[in-house]
Structure formats: C-alpha cells, structure tokens
Amino acid sequence: MTDNPIIPEARSDDRSVGRRTVLIATGTTAAALAVGAAAAPGTVSAPTAQAPDTAPAAAAVCTLTKEMTQGPYYLDGALVRSDVTEGKPGVPLKLALTVVNSACTPISNALVEIWHTDALGEYSGYVGANGHNESDDRTFLRGGVLTNSSGVANLTTIYPGWYRGRCIHVHVKVHTGVTVTADGHFTGGRTVHTGQLFFNETITAAVAKVSPYSTNTVTRTTLSQDSIYDGGGASSGLLTLTTLGGSASSGYSGTLTLGVSG
C-alpha cells in the first residue's frame, strides 16, 4: 500500500474511567492505597500499619489500567509468538508485562497482544500510510504471547517509530480463555483490556537520533502533545524503561503491570 491517508485515532469514550483508588477494608475503616502509579511493576505498596486492636485487612482491589482506543490499525488473527520483529531494524525493546486482576492476583495463560509501527512509522498491513514504501508488508511488529504462572508476558520487539499526529506508543490487548491453534494463531476467549503503552520522552528523544529512526522526516508529536495519553503515568500505560547497555542503540527493557477487569 503506498498512498493510504493517515487515519486519526479518536480519543477513547472510556477516558472517564480514570485511575481507581485501592481500598483496604479493615472492619469499620478503609485506608486508601495507590497501586500501579507509585508501585514498581508487579508489586503492591504495603498498606499503612494497623492499630493492634483492628481486624486484619482484606485483599486489596488493584487499580485498573486505563482503557484506551484500539485505533484504526488493528488486524485480526495475530500470531502467537514472543518475538514479533520479523527482522525489522531498530533499537531492541524487551517487554515484560504483568497481568493482574482486580484482587491483585496474577492471571496466567492470558494472551497479551501488541502491535505498533516500525522505525519509520509504518504498520504492517498499512505500509505507505506514513509516506514510506516497502517491498514486503508482512505481519511485522504484531503478535502475542501467553502469560506464565506469575502473570508475566515476555515479548521481544523494537522501539516504535512515530507517525503524524501521535506520540510513540504500542497498542496492547489482553485476552483470557483463548485457544492457541496449530497454525500459531489464537481463537475464542474474551478481551479484558484494550490500551496503549507509552515511553519516557527523554529516552524517545535519544532513540530518535539513532538510525533508522533518524531518517523519519515526519514531525514527531511529543508525549505532552499527544491527544490520547493523559499524563496518568503507569495507570495510563507509561512504561518503566531500563537501558540494556551504555547507549540508546543498545536497547531497553520495558515493564508495566496491567490491571484488568477479568
């Protein structure tokens, strides 16, 4: 595809959901506990110590990660695979996404599916939408993997590029109850979360100077300028990024806990 127009991604109608406060029920009292934005991925902050005569606290109710628009570039029939790169060049990105339910319990065998652009801002299936021609459209930078017994989905990809009107991001869906088929796809189940993953602007600016990102001449929308990201931090999909080496080209690991309703 060579002349597809950019299709703007509408702001989600579910933005009123917002971050949800964690409540610790203690008999006659309740203490607020912030989970997700303040806690490290996969962990829950400890509640305030109780007085000796109070009843033990009930299980925390985890913050749900904000639902966001699916966008126009989703394709059904994603491959179940941990490495979605298909040889695409770019800065390595290792994602470790932990899926928990509203009781903060890890969910195993949930299918975490991602899709995003290559370094030049092109989605597979829509190549040409950001002004670049490629010889093979393929299924690059799309796929999903089942969470392990700790609720963690490990995915290997590259740092996304950017296209007109959006900051750098990765789309994500979480499905439960899926069946993996013999041909490496999945069927059935239900979608319990649709969201987006976002990146620290300082790190993105460094990556943008690395080839082939540096050849993308489209004006880059920053995180603060984006129409979808709302500044909510981890509960709105902001990844915690850690360098894999001594420079931007070495790559990054990205972690986040996804609180889902299922």
Image (spheres, helix red, strand yellow):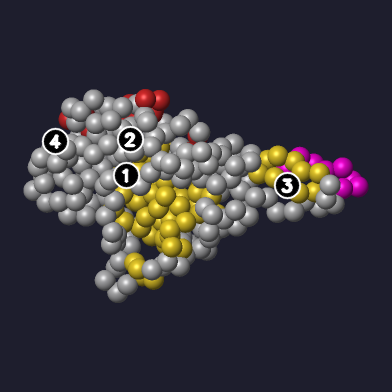
Q: CA distance from mark 3 to mark 4?
A: 51 Å
Q: Earlier in the sequence, mark 4 or mark 2?
A: 4
Give the vertical position of 128 relative to 210 (above or below). Answer: below
Q: How many marks?
A: 4
Is residue 55 among what the camera can see? yes
Foreground mark, 3 or 1?
1
Q: Residues within 10 Å of mark 3 (few under 14, many from 20)?
A: some
Label number found at residue 24: 3
Q: Is residue 125 left or right of residue 152?
A: left
Secondary structure of the residue carrying numbered label 2: loop
Q: Amino acid at mark 4?
A: Gly
Label 3 – label 1 distance at C-alpha:
36 Å
Q: Residues within 10 Å of mark 4 (few under 14, many from 20)?
A: many
> Which mark's residue is nearer the viewer, 1 or 4?
1
Could you tell which of marks 1 and 2 lies nearer the N-terminus? 1
Gap in angstroms between the C-alphas marked 2 and 3: 36 Å
At a point 54% along the width and 54% down the height, the residue shown is 261
Outermost residue toward the front in this view = 13
| Residue located 47% across and 30% down the image | 231
Highlighted range, magenta: 46-54
Name the residue beneath numbered marker 4: 131
Residue 68 vs residue 61, the one in the foreground = 68
Precedes in sequence: disc 2 or disc 3: 3
Q: Nearer the viewer, mark 1 or mark 2?
A: 1
Residue receiving disc 2: 168
Give the mark, 3 or 1, whose residue is nearer the N terminus. Answer: 3
The residue that disc 1 covers is 71
Residue type at tag 2: Ile
Confirm or deny contact between disc 1 and disc 4 (CB under 8 A). Answer: no
- Examine the image and state in which quarter residue 177 appears: bottom left
Residue closer to the observer: 43 or 228: 228
